Image: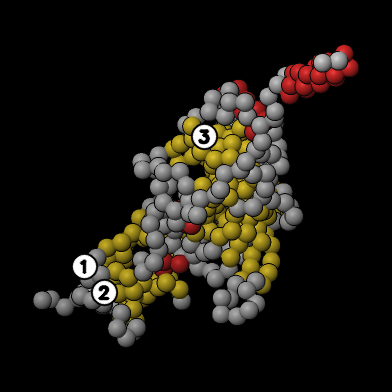
Amino acid sequence: MNMKRILFYLSFLSLIFMSSCELFEEDPPKDFVPSEPDPTGNLLIINNSNEHLVLYKDEYMVKKIPASATDYLVNIPNPTEGTVQLDLYIWEDVKDDPNNPDPEEVYKRWVVPLANSDKVEDRATWHISGASQYTNVATVTFRYYGGTDEFVDVYLDGRTGAKIASLKAGQDRVVGIDYDNYTLHYLYWFSDQNTSESFEELGWIEKELVNGEEKDIWLILNENRKDVTIIIPHLGSAQNSGTKYGNLRISNTSGDPVQIFAGDKLIESICYLEDGSIENLSTIDRNGTYTFIMPIYEEDALEAEYILSAHHLTNGTVIETTTITVIAEDTVDWEVDGQPDGEEPPAE
């Protein structure tokens, strides 16, 4: 082998060796591959942070969340329906060892009571903002009572801010929101599923009455206000800062099942229900009793008047009517016996 060929091979091997050193000098960056969302779930994530995130439950990795504000469903089994700790980490902070994140690097943390159900009405929503100054997340329950056909969307910090919830009358929504100070803005709309015009904007509520003056609707979230309930008013009602509730216990001794109305609406569309479904709640069986939780909306009021009627199930005739005053934090009774008020039922 002549000297030129030897030099050529030595140069070639040297080049390969140098290239190999450069290739293996450090590991190549780990790529972020988002997890597929679940088809159904008990947690809806809206990621407005513009960050690739990793979700952990009780320190175990659950999902890699894309940097997108598109609705992202996650199903986290929770048979006891107790509170669980959910942690979010930025991918860049955990990519070297995703299964062992450093607790000091946590981006957001939410301790939330998750339902063990994939029904839409039971689903919690986690609104992830781009703010990074606070780690902890508060649990805000929005309640929108029955008695209206209008839908409502909830926005933070203005009409063009983040939409964090959408509700129809009679619904609750549990939302995780960063500790911080916000203003709330309610957009009311109507949807007729029988026509092509499925959305009609009806108006906004962006102020509430405080001591007789209109003020911004503030939502202050911190360690002392980490579990907050917000009552959403109906459109046309001036929101006050202290909606209260009273109990209305109705007993049916008339001998037939009855359907209860408050005004011209079924009482199920007006009352508040903590758990379960309001469907057909207005019907009380013979010898049945049910206690309805009724809202008192007027500012500074401790009672509210309701005009009630009991209707026959078969022909819809009114069996009995009454006017009841519901008192805050108290229970009032109405016995439906099929007799005009003040008269005793016939002796058997």
For the point 66% across and 72% down, the residue is 200
Residue situated in front as seen by the camera: 144 or 236: 144
For the point 12% across and 76% down, the residue is 347
Give me the disc on residue 257.
Answer: 2
Q: CA distance from mark 3 to mark 2?
A: 52 Å
- Indicate which label's residue lies in the foreground, 3 or 2: 3
| Label 3 secondary element | strand
Residue situated in front as seen by the camera: 274 or 307: 274
* Residue 303 image position (x, y, % from top left): 46, 58
As shown in the figure, which amino acid type bears the numbered disc 1? Answer: Asn
As shown in the figure, which amino acid type bears the numbered disc 2? Answer: Pro
Q: CA distance from mark 1 to mark 3?
A: 53 Å
Q: Which picture quadrant has residue 168?
A: bottom right
> Mark 3 or mark 1, which is nearer the start of the sequence?
3
| Label 1 secondary element | loop
- Report whether 103 appears left or right of 2: left
As shown in the figure, which amino acid type bears the numbered disc 3? Answer: Met
Q: Residue furthest top?
A: 3
- Residue that numbered label 1 is attached to: 287
- Residue that numbered label 3 is attached to: 61
Residue situated in front as seen by the camera: 337 or 344: 337
